[in-house]
Amino acid sequence: MQSRERLLTALNHQEPDRIPFDLGSTQVTDIHALAYANLRQALGLPAVEIHMCDAVQQLALPDADLIERLGVDVRGLFPLNSHNWQVHAQDAGAYWIYHDEWGITHRRPRPDGLYYSVVEVPLGSPHLTAEDILKHTWPNMADPVRIAGLREQAERYRAYGYAIVLKDPFAGIFEMSQRIVGMENIMMMMALDKKKAGTLFDKLLDLKLAFWEMALPQLADVVDVISHADDYGTQASQLISLAMFREQIKPRLKSIFACLERLAPHARRFFHSCGNVRPLIPDFIEIGVQILNPVHIRAKGMQPAALKRDFGDELVFWGGGVDTQAVLPSGTPQEVRDDVRRNIEALAPGGGFVFSTVHNIQADVPAQNMVAMWEALQEYGVY
Amino acid sequence: MAEPYLPVDVVFHPNWWQRHYGLSFDRDFFYDAQRRVWQEQRMRHLLYERFGDLGLGQKDAPRRPIIGPILMGSGYIIQEILGCEIKYQESGNPWVLSRNLSEAEIWDLEVPENIEATPPMRALLGLMETLEAEFGYLQGDVPLHSIINVAIDLRGQDYFIDLIENQALVAHLHQVIARTIYEVAAG
């Protein structure tokens, strides 16, 4: 089986020849640049200049030789955005400072900080009004430059037999709102001033829809999966209540998936949310989510066997292949193998599973554990 | 005559004590009378030895019958009475593990009927009796903590959602905690 056929078979809830493998097709299934360099060395691949698909998270864009060596089945298309475009960091002594197109200020410790963190938001005033939100200088998501070259890139990937994921242009409306007004402010707005929160959410929704209206007529026929990411879960519970999600977030999320379905009916809809999102999963399915990521198996309520039992007929699980909070960074190679085997046994039967780590592989993951993960996938991932 | 400066107290983290002097802050530090008196005296002695010129510690520190988390900031006993597991640590403050109780479990939560009979209170009262028998008096305090901190330890992060959307539940939870604190203090 070629990679694309393998992935599509799994997405159709059928068993391909082996479990499809993703490393680096999205900004939530990727690998930190330091870990990537270590992995290349462990595999005996030559040192290379690392290209970032996400400079803020310092995520590597895996090179073709590593993709081929590991049998990765999926390649990603990354539209130009504030994480991979015009990231002009300034030297500010103890930090690299970067002001992005949204007006957000990020910083990364010098000389070897692992990633950028948001340190200043553009609309963080306690006296913020709805008018301020509307008057803010927003990025132009309808600019075709954001997808320049992606179609050609997709056609090249297709020619090699890879499946293709197209990434959303920026974080989900809840997460992006936190970066625009500050987490504490959006939480207070959602609780006390729903109208103002709604103004911000609607603005971000408009930007997302404008991007998809521009991009999908050009790309829909060459992509297999479209990814969208937000974050509602925590280790134990959710950041907001189910009622708040249903009232303020879900209708807008539904608009996004309806737009994707209309403009790219053949592309599967991939949705990412970290943490325990189990109470939200029926709602995700209802509004058109077909693939769940990262399957945060260490969070409360996210045990893989129970997820497969309860939602495996309707959802594809893309992730959950190995625990990245404890086992992958701190376990022994044998513990990594055991975890991979357990998760495959729970998630793989009947198809509907794409192997990927739970979110990105972080900088401190030992190379021997990454290799152990991959070896276990080869051993246990054959149908 | 009044001192020209505000009084200053310095509290070192257990990790500092462990790293520099090998002192442990396991459960015995809090409830074993002999160990507690010895270690508290030793801590004051070591502080004087190292920082006496700055006014810390005490020369020839006498043995003292101290209860509570003296020389370290922590609160745990109210949570333990209400069912939280406390993880005592060699080089850290007692760590209260959140119970993450469900809404139904919070509604079922009550002030323990006989607080003095709960394991943490039995341990504390035993310590107090032993020390009082030897010294004739007690020093220190019982850490009563605060309602919100205890509420978070019982309900977990969903407490913050309850504050917005389930205020009757929060009122019940606060009432149970406040009554428990009152009963401990009154006893």
Image (tube, grey):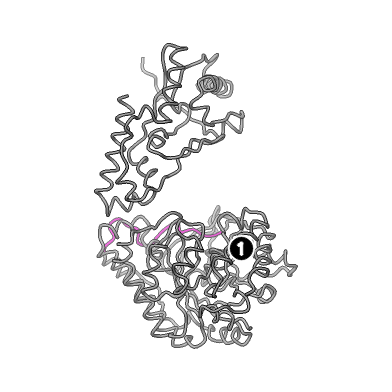
Q: Amino acid at mark 1?
A: Val
Highlighted range, magenta = A115-129
Q: Chain of mark 1?
A: A
Identify which residue is drawn at 54% across, 78% down: A10
Task: Tell me if I can see residue B48 in this picture.
Answer: no
Image x and y of residue B62, in percent: 51, 14
Residue B96: image location, x then y, percent: 45, 40
In the displayed structure image, the side of residue B74 where residue B183 appears, left or right: left
Residue hosting label 1: A340
- Above or below residue A116? Residue A228 is below
The C terminus of chain A - image quarter: bottom right
Q: Nearer the viewer, residue A290 or A112?
A: A290
Check disc 1 and report its element: helix, strand or loop: helix
Tell me which residue sits at (50%, 68%) in the image.
A83
Residue A118 magenta-highlighted: yes
Above or below, A105 against B187 in this view is below
